Image (cartoon, coloured by chain):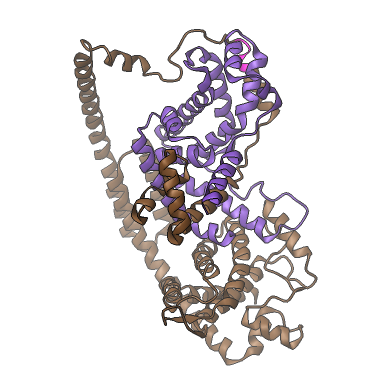
Amino acid sequence: MKHRAMHIQDELADARRPTRTIGTLMNSVESLAARVRDGDEAAFQLIYDRYARPLISFIYDQVGERALAEELTQETFVRAYRGIGSLRDDCHLSTWLFGIAKNVARESLRARRRGGKQIEFEDPAVGRVCDKEPPPDNQLLQEELNARIHDALRCLDEDKRLVFTLKVFHERSYEEIKEITGFSIPKIKIDLHRARVEMRRLVGSYLEVRR
Amino acid sequence: MKCDECLQRIEEYFDGELDAPTASRFSAHLAGCAACAEVAEELRCEAEAYLSYDRPVEVTSALWVSVKARIKNEKPSHTPRFGVNPFGWLAGAFNFPPLAPALAALILVALGIGSGVMLFKKSHEFESMREVVIDSANDIRADGDGASKVTATKETLNETSANVGAVASPEDNLAGASEKVLSSQRMNARNRENIIGNRFHAKAYGGRTRHANVTGRNNQPDDLTAKSERGLERPRNQSPLIETTLPDTLTAASNMRASANTNRDLGDPDREWRTHAERAQMLLRSFRNAPFAGGGAHGAQTIDVAYERRQSKKLLYDNIILRRDAAARGDRSAERLLGSLEPILLDIANLPERPLSGEVRSIEQQMRKKEIVAQLQAQSINAQNIFD
């Protein structure tokens, strides 16, 4: 059981790490940041290749809208490029990028709230079925689970959603979450626990039937 | 380590946030405690399911092109800016001891003035809103069944309240007033449905021929028809609940499923819907009458629901598709009914093969509370009337 638990943790950690591209593996994060500061656009593209996927997923989880997520990802990278000089520790490039993404997403959500508009979420059914083959029942259930997770994330308040997505989807440590969000560790623990309980309540039965 | 301590910090352990000695104590405890190990296993399964979450987002080449276009004329900064944390400079000022108290006082005064101005503005807006609401409520009272008026008034109010932002109570009052009108209409509709439902009940139990005609399966061999009448067995080559008229992307899924079947209902969502309602109804009746299976672990009564579990899982998939279809068609009542049926189907599907009678009873209570069987019955008969 002990070995299994440790093995599972390792496996999960590997699975959650974003895929690395060959280009970024050959360039350390520190040197990339330094090169970008010297105006090397190719280095910035390597950073983009490395982090675009996790950042767009993270932003989508916060705002729940595909087109907006793309727009905000673009804004995140533009701000990152402009502000790369403010990156104090080049080793923390990823945390820093997530911090910018968090600010961009929050600003957008607040702007919408100030405008009195409800966020219009996309129809979860749209674009989900496009194969010619009949979808097996478990695929259908997976689609439903996706829709449920999407809706359940919308039910969490902003702080809990932020902490939950960073921990569960992006496997950030509490320290990294603290750095990204500015929350204290006890708050992170409490928010994460409550978010897990809430998510379990909202999608738990789908998780069980999927097993 | 005790279970209490373990359960209190099990999420931290699972998140890999414990120091090495504590983590090894946890591992040792989990190796010997089945209850805690089960909680850890649940966390693992949850994490796995969350990792399978597939978002409809892609990193397109167009995205990089737009980023590139925007940074083309930009110069990356060499010096720290306030881009990431616009209030970083403020935090810095607070760190300077002589300035901190004065700065804090200044901020408090500014906040006080700001909130005073806001309150003053709000009170004026509130007064004007109140007048609108009172007028609207009078209109509703004057027009007893004025659902359209209610809707129109609500829309006006929604528009206005969107501008005002924080006028919850008057809106709630109006919503309450209009809800009363609507709920009385709903009550009437429900009574009508109950009457129809009872009539259907009498017919359904009076003779099977009628039921066989309703389901349109009287051309099948007798044994299959009998099973279908129970609504619990779907013959291999008979139509599932999917049809060819489902809109948009759902159509694809429906067509795929439907094409695998030779003898199917042709593109009629009502018929599909009715068939599903009948099957669900029969399943729930069967579940209510599930036989006792003998004594459980501590002498408690268990119930044999293996068959209902299987069927419930099958119906669940159809339910999901039909609910999405109803949502796409804008059929709110069907969507609501299918939405309230789904948790019950899920609960049944998630039961163990031989659950304790208490577990079954709690689902039955849910069914009773939602009056789900009666609603399904009414739905089948409504669809039948349209069909006739």
Q: Is residue B159 above or below residue A37?
A: below
Magenta: main secondary structure equals helix
Spot occupied by residue B209 in the image (x, y as percentages of width and height) = 66, 89
Residue B172: x %, y % from top left = 31, 51
- Vertically, is B45 above or below B360? above
Residue B70 among magenta residues:
yes
For the question of whether residue B385 can be seen, the reply is no
The chain letter corresponding to brown is: B
Query: Observer-nearest residue: B286 or B282?
Result: B286
Q: Which residues fall within the magenta stretch?
A: B69-73
Residue B194 sits inside the magenta stretch: no
Whether residue A93 is visible: yes
Identify the residue at the far bottom of this view.
B206
Give the residue furthest to the right. Answer: B262
Q: In this image, B195 relative to B54: left or right?
A: left
Q: Residue at x 44, y 39 (%)?
A: B20
Question: Which quadrant would the C terminus of chain B be assigned to in this image?
Answer: bottom right
Residue drawn at (40%, 59%) of the image:
B146
> Looking at the image, which residue is at 59% across and 48% down?
A124
For this rendering, which residue is in front, B268 or B293? Answer: B293
Colour of chain A in the rendered structure image: purple
